[in-house]
Amino acid sequence: MNNKVLLLILAALLAIYGLSRLFSGKKDSTFQTELISVDSTVVGSLQLAPKGEEAPFSLKKEEGRWFATQNDLTVPANASSVQSLLAGLSMIRTQYIAAKDKEKWPEYEVEEGKASHVQVYDQKGKLLKDFFIGRFDVNQQARTITAFIRLNGQNEVYAVDGMQTMAFGRAFLDFRNTELLKMTREMEVTAFDYVLPDTTLQFQKSPTGWQIGSEVLDSMKVEDYLNVLRNVSGDSFADDFDELKAGQYPQQQLILKGNNILEPFEVTVYRDTTRELPFVIRSNYNPNTYFASDSTGLFKKLFVPVEGLQ
């Protein structure tokens, strides 16, 4: 094969390569199709500073469990919220480059201190990803959301699918375990007690319906009440409550027993009249969290007056 033929073959190969680059859309070496891709199994912690949050917070995995820390407060993290966040890290693809110059950062709200800042570390503390999430654009007609991301240390601003980044804007509260009670479908309450400071009221389900002692209750009202208790969450916390002093406060309990409930659910309520929300509530389902309530909130869901069940 002579040199002329070789040159023609080489020219053809270069032409094919050039066309493939042209039609693949990769005209610019700074364009990254896979902007962020992290294996969730190697993530050990995240440092998050969402827009509008009072203080940054961290999520850290310890012995298979996730914990959320903000300032001096460390609490067990909501597992589903953490998994949603990690799922967002698995693959964030670039739609297009929105800007290449630092002067454009304010337009897309990706400056440090104004954007949501996300840092992802592996289990040995090595920084894996460091990026800022800025403005969200909503196209109601197309039903799409576009978010703008800047990788720390780069000038480019990338447009990505906003749904993939929504979880990174959540507040510390969204990562807390807010569940007070949660029953599975097969659990059936057949008895419950109100343990009050001066007496105990025992409610029983008989073949003919619900009753307290010999007094017959409206079984439909009782079942409606119990259905509320199958999934109870709180949104106010008593993180400063001193559990060592808990015994000095008046208290009452709700105890739920029944079929497929191996250990009775126990909810303890302490009353501290010096607090703005005087009822401090804790359950053995989520024993590490103290909730706060007034008489119209969480407390009212837990304790219905007997006349309300008649």
Image (cartoon, helix red, strand yellow):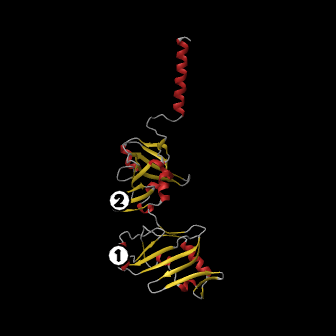
Three-letter residue code for mark 2: Ala
In percent of the image, x 49 and y 42: which residue is there? 34
User: Is residue 69 rendered to the left or right of residue 93?
Assistant: left
Q: Are marks 2 and 1 in contact (CB under 8 Å)?
A: no
Specify the label residue 55 is tagged with.
2
- Whichever of labels 2 and 1 marks the residue nearer the N terminus, that label is 2
Q: Across the whole image, how many numbered discs are drawn on residues?
A: 2
Q: How many residues crowd mark 2 within 10 Å: few (<14), some (14–19), many (20+)?
A: few
| Residue closest to the eye, 50 or 137 | 50
In percent of the image, x 55 and y 14: which residue is there? 5
User: Is residue 230 rendered to the left or right of residue 294?
Assistant: right
Disc 1 element: helix
List the single residue furthest toward the top.
Answer: 2
On the rendered image, what quadrant is the C terminus found in?
bottom right
Q: How many residues crowd mark 1 within 10 Å: few (<14), some (14–19), many (20+)?
A: few
- List the residue tagged with mark 1: 245
Specify the label residue 288 is tagged with.
none
Q: CA distance from mark 2 to mark 1?
A: 29 Å
Q: Report which quarter residue 151 is drawn in.
A: top left
Disc 2 element: loop
Q: Position of residue 193 (x, y in %)?
A: 52, 80
Q: Is residue 272 visible?
A: no
Q: Position of residue 217 (x, y in %)?
A: 60, 85
Whether 97 is drawn above or below 241: the answer is: above
Three-letter residue code for mark 1: Lys
Q: Position of residue 174 (x, y in %)?
A: 45, 61
